[in-house]
Image: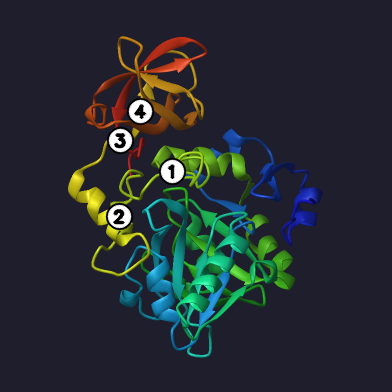
Amino acid sequence: MALRTPPLFGRHEDRGAQFTEFGGWEMPVEFDSIRTEHEAVREAAGVFDVSHMGEIEVDGPDAERLMQRLTTNDVSRLDPGDAQYAAITDEDGVMLDDTVVYRLPADDDPEFLFVPNAGHDEQMYERWTDYRDAEDLTATVDNVTGEYGMVAVQGPEAPDLVAARAGDDVLDLGRFEAEYADVAGVECLVANSGYTGEAGFEVVFPADGAGAVWDAFANNCQPCGLGARDTLRLEYGFLLSGQDFHPEDNPRSPFEAGIDFAVDLDAEFVGRDALDAQRSAGLDEEFVGFVLEERGVPRHGYDITDADGDVVGEVTSGTMSPTLGEPIGLGYVDAEYAADDTTIYVDVRGTGKRATTTTPPFIDQ
C-alpha cells in the first residue's frame, strides 16, 4: 500500500529533508541534523510538520455523550476553546491510543475535534461510529484527516514567533486552550500545546493553506523532523503510541503507563470498571524513566534486569539525550523496582549496563 503524504511534502522535498515511514505516512525525519533541530527547540524555536496526526470531528445532540464514553477524561468539563489529554481504552482498560480532545471555539463548528495518533484515524473513526450505532446515539462522526494540515511551533521563542504571525491574543491562551487566528491569510485553530516540553503551539489549518502557514514559520525558525521530535519528547518522558504501549504487542492501562491524570473514574467510559479494579488491586508493573550510568544506548525491546541478571522489565524507548549527553530510557519494571534511585541493569547486546530509575522529565522544567 502506498504511503500517505502530508500536504507539505513538496516543501520538505525542496528543503532537502530525509524521509521515513511512520504510521503509514512518509514524513521528514530530519532536515539538517537531529542534534541541530533538537538544540534549536531547546534554545530558540523549531517548527514541525505533524500532519500525520489524525483529525476526527464529532457533532450532534449526543456528541458529548459519545466522546465521554470513548475517552478516559471528563469531556463535560470542557468549555468551548478548551482541550484535554485522554486515553482511549477497551473494555479491559487497555490503551488503544492516546489523544487530545478539543471542544471547538465557535458555535457553528462541529462540537468536538479529537486527534488520534498517526495511522489510527480510520480505526478510531470506525470505533466511534460502531459505538454510536450500537448505542443508538445521534451524532455525526467525520474523519477529516485528509482535509487538514498541522504544524507545531515549539521552543522558548515560539510564543513570540507565533504571536507575530497569529496576533498577540494567542499569548493569552492557557495550556490546552485554543482559538481561531489568521496566519498568512489562512484561518487556523491555534492551541497552546505540544510534545516537546517547551512552550509552544500546535496549529491546524485547511490543507490548501498548508504552504502559506509553513512558510510563515519555517522561514523564520528551524524546520524539524520526527527524529528531533522523538528525542525531545523522550527527555520529558512523553508516551509514544505504538512504542511505549501497544494494544497487542505491549498492552498497558493508563495507570501502568503513568498517565493517571488523564483518567477520571467518576466519568462513565468504556474500560472504567476494569481500571477501577486495577487501581484497587495495585499495579504489578510501572512505567519509569532511567539514566544509564555506563556506556551504551538503551533501545526499544531491551531487557531490564536485576543485579543477578533476572529480567524485571523491558525498555520501550531510549536515546542518547542531546541535552544531557547521557543515555536515557523509558520502560516498564516490576513494581518493586519502580521507586526513584533504584539500581537496575539494561541488557545492551548481552551486557548488563547499570542504570538508575528516575521520574521524568530528565531535564529541568
| Upstream in sequence: badge 1 or badge 4 | 1
- 200 vs 311, left or right, is right
Residue 184 seen in render: yes
| Number of numbered discs visible in the structure rendering | 4
Front residue of this view, candidates 209 and 354: 354
Q: Can you identify the residue that label 3 sits on?
A: 285
Nearer the observer, disc 2 or disc 1?
2
| Upstream in sequence: badge 2 or badge 1 | 1
| Upstream in sequence: badge 3 or badge 4 | 3
- Say few, some or many: other residues with alpha carbon within 10 Å of mark 2 (under 14 / 14 to 19 / 20 or more): some
Q: Can you identify the residue that label 1 sits on?
A: 251
Q: Tell me the number on the disc at residue 290.
A: 4
Could you tell me if the residues under marks 2 and 3 are in contact, i.e. CB atoms within 8 Å?
no
Q: How is the image coloured?
A: rainbow
Real-space Cα separation, disc 1 to disc 3, in angstroms: 12 Å
Q: Position of residue 141 (x, y in %)?
A: 56, 77
Q: Can you identify the residue that label 2 sits on?
A: 274
SS state under label 2: helix
SS state under label 4: strand
Give the position of the C terminus as an image quadrant: top left
